[in-house]
Image (cartoon, rainbow, N blue to C red):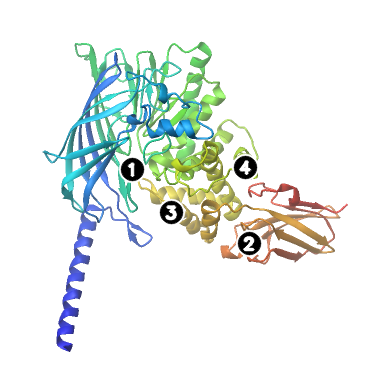
Amino acid sequence: MKKIHSLLLLAVIIISCAQIKEVHTSSEKNIKADINFGNPYWQQHVDYTMDIDVDVNNYQYKGKQKLVYTNNSPDELNKVFYHLYFNAFQPGSQMDVRSLNIKDPDRRVKDRISKLMPNEIGYIKVSTLKQDGAAVNFNTVGTILEVTLNTPIKSGESVTFDMVFDAQVPIQVRRSGRNSKENVALSMAQWYPKMAEYDFEGWHTPPYIAREFHGVWGNFDVTLHIDKNYVVGGTGYMQNPQEVGHGYEDASKELKLPKGDKLTWHFKAPRVHDFMWAADPAYIHDVLKMENGIDLHFYYKKTLEEKYLKNWKDLQPKTAELMTYFSEHVGEYPYKQYSVIQGGDGGMEYAMSTLITGQRKFGSLFGVTAHEMAHTWFQFLLATNESLHPWMDEGFTSYISNKAENEILKENKENPHAGSYRGYRAIVSRGFEESLSTHADRYDTNWGYGTASYSKGNIFLAQLEYIIGAENTAKGIKKYFTDFSFKHPTPNDVKRSMEKVSGIHLDWYLNEWTQTLHTIDYGIKSVEGNEITLERIGQMPMPIDVEVTYTDGTKQNYNIPLRMMRGAKPTSATVIEDWGWAYPTYTFEVSKKVKSVTIDKSGLMADMNLENNRFTIE
């Protein structure tokens, strides 16, 4: 029996080693050599080739799509899923019904989808789909195409999907569509059958209700055939400039416009996870060439009022300043062009480009451009799953664009994020706050979603300046970009980047701020002689900065680290004994008679009750 057991054990060991070797070999061959905190990092890859014929008279288009899909996961895939976003713009869709039932509907949507006529709706209808040349079974369920594969896609394997589809562009309701309020003909976002993301958490196939996205990194080769009077701009590099003109061509070379009613526009976009384009016969196309070799493209309607046309001209050098700011403070922009395009229904970011509405005062036009361009770093290069973590997208973008605006426009605001703090305190005080861990689609109110994603997400970084120091936060952002650009980072990844540059433990902060509704409230309980007693009233613990003013007019600053931090931020203040979170009060002594005590003079701590943050002895 002993011998049999030994043989069985040996066999198990041999099989296990073979399996480990097989996985290791597969990983080596197909996965970028990268270790994410001890776990092999992998992500799927797509290569799209699309040929699109557009009929601008009925706002319909026919498409052929070739998609080479590489399964870099360790899993065998029996199904794949595509997003068909335009199907949301139909009466009775989940997006329509959600807008009809939510407490505070988006003013751009409201009941508009429910009233669309058949020639106004959006749709994407897949007529044929093949896997490596063989037809596969598929089923359209709302905005998702469910595909049952003929043969599984093994780990490390690439397959080719060939698709033929027909589509109709909806009336402009939200982000995408035709004939916007500013009369832009075509804003083409979320317009093609898009492979859903499969990652370490599995498939991501939420129905589209006009919130957030998650996409697979890859390369796009897109050919558009459209009426020759239309000017097209968007994602990617123009491949045939001499055949289209409209500001793309090289003036030193002969323009070779083809005969017929349509022009062919050919774009390629490397290493992106989405593709947007917009088209209008009245577009002006300006190009500003930066000294660093990046071309900035601007598309706006020549029919705009003179004051708006001037704003679009004035915007161009300021956009170059934004490009420089973000590259210096986050990470270098890796592409050779960026486009700012009038279109859409407000402002929305896309790969190498943005759609923004154009009839704005200059401050508003600059502000929306700053925010949407900043998304290039926080979402398109640091491609978080914004459906699960919209605060890492909208919040971080708000943080860096607020700082950029403050510097470039010389606004000299002491705290450029003050609006986010006000918004956060307002929603908490009225009882409508929801956790940052809520899926973007499942917030009870648009107000709750917006405040969580934009305001509380912004405060996550602004408050880190208070916890680990402004310099460490700035270094942490750069490290985060260096380590996770062209990937799909998670909340833990940004936390670890900040920990590595600061040496401070931040697991408590990530948990409290993003996974609970705990609030911060510290107060000055008493000042008796030379003893100052502080109290923690709120559930969320924090390190505390205290300014003490003495009766002789002098001042002294103290820093009380939170014990769980296992360290203190760089500071000129006197660092005193740390405060364990379980203790509700903290007492320390000073050397002179006290006149007043102030908690957090910077205002960067999101304390809910500021009235108990100052104590003055009369």
Q: Secondary structure at mark 2?
A: loop
Residue 286: give its label.
none
Pointer 4: residues within 10 angstroms few (<14), some, or many (20+)? many
Q: Nearer the viewer, mark 2 or mark 1?
A: 1
Q: Amino acid under label 4?
A: Tyr
Question: Nearer the viewer's eye, disc 3 or disc 1?
Answer: 1
Residue 421 marker: 4
Mark 1 nearby-residue class (10 Å; few <14, some 14–19, many ≥20): some
Q: CA distance from mark 2 to mark 1?
A: 43 Å
Which mark lies nearer to you, 1 or 4? 1
Residues 526 and 5: in front is 5
Q: Going from the N terminus, do you reach mark 2 or mark 1 first? A: 1
Give the residue at mark 1: 205
Spatial separation of the CA atoms under disc 3 and disc 1: 23 Å
How many neighbours does mark 3 have within 10 angstroms: few (below 14), some (14-19), or many (20 or more)?
Answer: some
- Amino acid type, callout 2: Pro
Which residue is located at x 75 percent, y 65 percent? 588
Separation of disc 2 and disc 4 at Cα?
22 Å
Q: Quadrant of the N terminus?
A: bottom left
**Between residues 602 and 330, which one lies in front from this camera angle?**
602
The first of marks 1 and 4 along the sequence is 1
Q: Is residue 407 left or right of residue 170?
A: right
Q: Is residue 240 visible?
A: no
At label 1, the amino acid type is Thr
- The spot of residue 512 in percent (x, y) is 55, 55
Q: Secondary structure at mark 1?
A: loop
Query: Can you name the residue that lies furthest to the bottom here?
Result: 2
Q: Count of labels shown?
A: 4
| Horizontal side, residue 395 vs residue 419: left or right | left
